[in-house]
Image (spheres, rainbow, N blue to C red):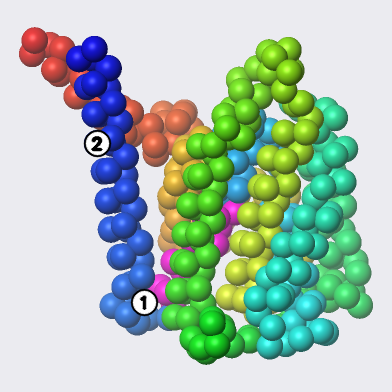
């Protein structure tokens, strides 16, 4: 009885610590553009948050559902192109409607694609994500009249950010788009956390652990894999909408397989199955990329070596550092006793 009470107390303490840490991090991020007024650093952290959201969406697939997507970045690209095309050709001032169009349009593409993919599993599923991703990349690269081809979609207007009748500023302002990104990423993180810790999330984890056993107990595996896939693509499309509002531009290279490998590295760096781990991994990856690229044009080689080192010695990503610390702390207590 005492052990159960201690276990429950420990879980409560852990939740409180994580909640306090989240509040502190969010407060620091919210104050960042007012303390560090250099536009370069504001834009750098903004990009970290956008790719952190994309990496978290991939973690929903890989870390919680056990589905590997080689080109999840394609759905960032699809969402970004849809938002940009809407702002250019339909309504240059309707930011929220443009973001909604990006999410809905990406979902309408992701559902039939996912329906085909979930009929397979394992390596076949991963190869299908690569095949569909390359198809989307080719469309973006070749459909010059709509997407701008290899030049990309340029001249995307920066609409004002309206909220409840108030104009908070223009999305072309680095501080405004930074705070907008922070707010949306935080909302997506909270919503995703609630979904993962719901019965739906428990079903996804059951499928990840053993598909056959999940099917045997009556779970419609294909249905839940499709729902998990669709939700992950919706999150990716939101990151795409934020990306084009921040950059004012989207090009086909954003949807390339090489960029997809980068997103996968972000998840592995941070740690799968944690939600916040991939966000941290995205920040570390972008920092490494930015720093090393200032020293050599062959930055990919050095980033690859760092990732190889971390995967070999920290297979659970930076999340594994916490587990290692707790293990050593427990070992010390054991020896002391």
Mark 2 or 1: in front is: 2
Q: Distance between the residues labelled 2 and 1?
A: 32 Å
* Horizontal and vertical percent position of residue 243: 62, 69
Give the residue at mark 1: 33
Q: Is residue 227 above or below residue 101?
A: above
Residue at x 73% of width, y 34% of height: 225
Which residue corresponds to the image point at 71% horizontal and 75% vertical from the top-left?
Answer: 98
Q: Name the residue under label 2.
A: 13
Span of residues in magenta: 40-54
Residue 72 percent coordinates (x, y): 70, 48
Residue drawn at x 48%, y 52% is: 190
Q: In which quarter of the image is the C terminus?
A: top left
Which of the image's four quarters has the N terminus? top left
Q: Residue 57, image x and y in percent?
A: 60, 48
Q: Main secondary structure of the magenta part?
A: helix
Q: In this view, does 174 lie to the left or right of 151?
A: left
Q: Of all residues shown, which one is farthest toward the front?
A: 1
Mark 2 and 1 residues: CB-CB less than 8 Å, in contact? no
The answer to whether 227 appears left or right of 277 in the picture is right
């Amino acid at each position: 009885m005492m052990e159960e009470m201690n276990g429950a107390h420990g879980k409560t303490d852990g939740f409180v610590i994580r909640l306090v840490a989240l509040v502190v991090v969010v407060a620091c991020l919210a104050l960042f553009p007012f303390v560090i007024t250099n536009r370069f650093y504001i834009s750098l952290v903004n990009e970290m948050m956008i790719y952190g959201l994309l990496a978290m969406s991939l973690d929903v697939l890989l870390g919680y559902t056990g589905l590997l997507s080689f080109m999840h970045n394609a759905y960032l690209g699809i969402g970004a192109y849809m938002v940009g095309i809407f702002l250019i050709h339909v309504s240059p001032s309707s930011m929220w409607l443009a973001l909604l169009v990006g999410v809905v349009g990406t979902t309408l593409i992701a559902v039939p694609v996912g329906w085909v993919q979930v009929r397979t599993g394992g390596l076949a599923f991963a190869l299908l994500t690569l095949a569909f991703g390359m198809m989307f990349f080719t469309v973006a690269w070749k459909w010059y009249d709509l997407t701008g081809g290899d030049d990309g979609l340029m001249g995307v207007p920066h609409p004002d950010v309206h909220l409840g009748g108030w104009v908070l500023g223009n999305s072309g302002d680095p501080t405004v788009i930074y705070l907008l990104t922070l707010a949306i990423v935080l909302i997506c993180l909270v919503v995703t956390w609630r979904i993962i810790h719901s019965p739906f999330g428990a079903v996804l984890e059951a499928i990840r652990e053993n598909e056959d056993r999940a099917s045997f107990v009556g779970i419609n595996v294909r249905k839940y894999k499709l729902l998990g896939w669709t939700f992950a693509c919706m999150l990716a499309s939101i990151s795409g909408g934020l990306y084009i509002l921040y950059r004012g531009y989207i090009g086909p290279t954003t949807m390339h397989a090489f960029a997809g490998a980068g997103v996968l590295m972000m998840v592995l760096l941070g740690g799968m199955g944690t939600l916040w781990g991939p966000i941290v991994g995205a920040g570390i990856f972008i920092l490494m990329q930015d720093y090393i690229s200032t020293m050599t044009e062959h930055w990919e080689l050095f980033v690859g070596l760092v990732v190889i080192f971390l995967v070999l010695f920290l297979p659970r990503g930076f999340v594994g550092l916490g587990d290692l610390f707790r293990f050593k702390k427990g070992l010390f207590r054991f020896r002391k006793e």
